[in-house]
Image (cartoon, grey):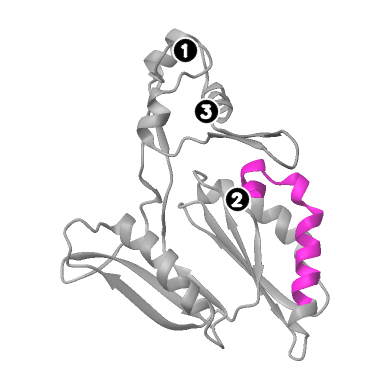
Amino acid sequence: MQVSIAYPGASALVLVESVLIPLEQSINGVPGMRYIVSDATSAGEATIRVYFEPGTDPDIAVVNVQNRVNIVLNRLPPLVVREGILVSQVVPSMLMQINVYSTDPNADQKFLYNFTNVNIMPRIKRINGVGLPVNLGNRAYAMRLWLNPERMRAYRISTEDVMKAVAEQSVIGSPGRLGLATGKTFQSRSGICAAVEELAERGAGGWGDRLDPASPDLPGVSPLGDGGLSAHPGSVAAALL
């Protein structure tokens, strides 16, 4: 049994102290458990592997572990809860490794990672006997803000103020509809910032017409997990039993 945790931006020490210790204390002693091991990386990812006695029903074991995880959710950082904690049946043995690469110079590692996630990983998941396919690293598209300390001091704002302003400027509105069964008028509004340029052009919390304390770009979530073949960039995926 494996419990997967993501805490973007956290170091391994922060993951251990704020996430792994509370989870281990809660999961330890779950019915049928033999022993438990865990590890954390500087990429903001951690796993807890729970080994059970032979003959333990894996479906019941998943339910028991999930219940133990739910007990301590209110003690975990909000970002960890928002990212989600995955409890899955998996044997920590790698069945195979897949290297996806391209000779197209326009296809970088971010593109290949997301291409693999969308087009290849769903097919691997449907193969009988595969427990958990993993796209190594985390280069999923994510918007990053580079903060300007000098401008932040001038506006007297903190990083929390920036995050709050971005959240307020990126919402999904549901105005509803007008009229009766006939002649309905539908209204919709998208407030999600779908592009870097769109976020940069939006005002933020009275800081002026532009988001000058923070400069957005579109990197991968984590730069770890490099792959490739013959000097061509690539994405590496693994299939666990």
Quarter of the N terminus within the rendering: bottom right
Q: Nearer the viewer, residue 20 or 112?
A: 112
120 sits left or right of 108 in the view: right
Residue wearing tag 2: 83
Q: Amino acid at mark 2?
A: Glu
- Residue 204 within the magenta-colored segment of the rendering: no
Sooner in the amino-acid sequence: mark 3 or mark 2: 2
Q: Residue at x 43, y 45 (%)?
A: 142
Q: Amino acid at mark 3?
A: Val
Q: Residue at x 44, y 23 (%)?
A: 202
The correct choice, above or below, for 136 with respect to 54 in the image is: above
Q: Is residue 196 visible?
A: yes
Q: Nearer the viewer, residue 168 or 226?
A: 168
Sooner in the amino-acid sequence: mark 1 or mark 3: 3
Q: Nearer the viewer, mark 2 or mark 1?
A: 1
Q: Rounded to the nearest whole Å, what is the CA distance between mark 1 and mark 3? A: 12 Å
Q: Secondary structure at mark 2?
A: helix
Q: Nearer the viewer, mark 3 or mark 2?
A: 3
Position of residue 177 measured from the top left corner of the image (x, y, whole percent): 69, 35
Position of residue 37 measured from the top left corner of the image (x, y, whole percent): 63, 69
Residue wearing tag 3: 166
Magenta-tinted stretch: 61-82
Q: Secondary structure at mark 3?
A: helix
Residue 207: assigned label: 1
140 sits left or right of 132 in the view: left
Task: For the residues labelled 3 and 2, say whether their Cβ atoms are less than 8 Å apart.
Answer: no
Count all numbered tags in the image, as a single digit: 3
Q: Secondary structure at mark 1?
A: loop
Q: Residue at x 56, y 21 (%)?
A: 161
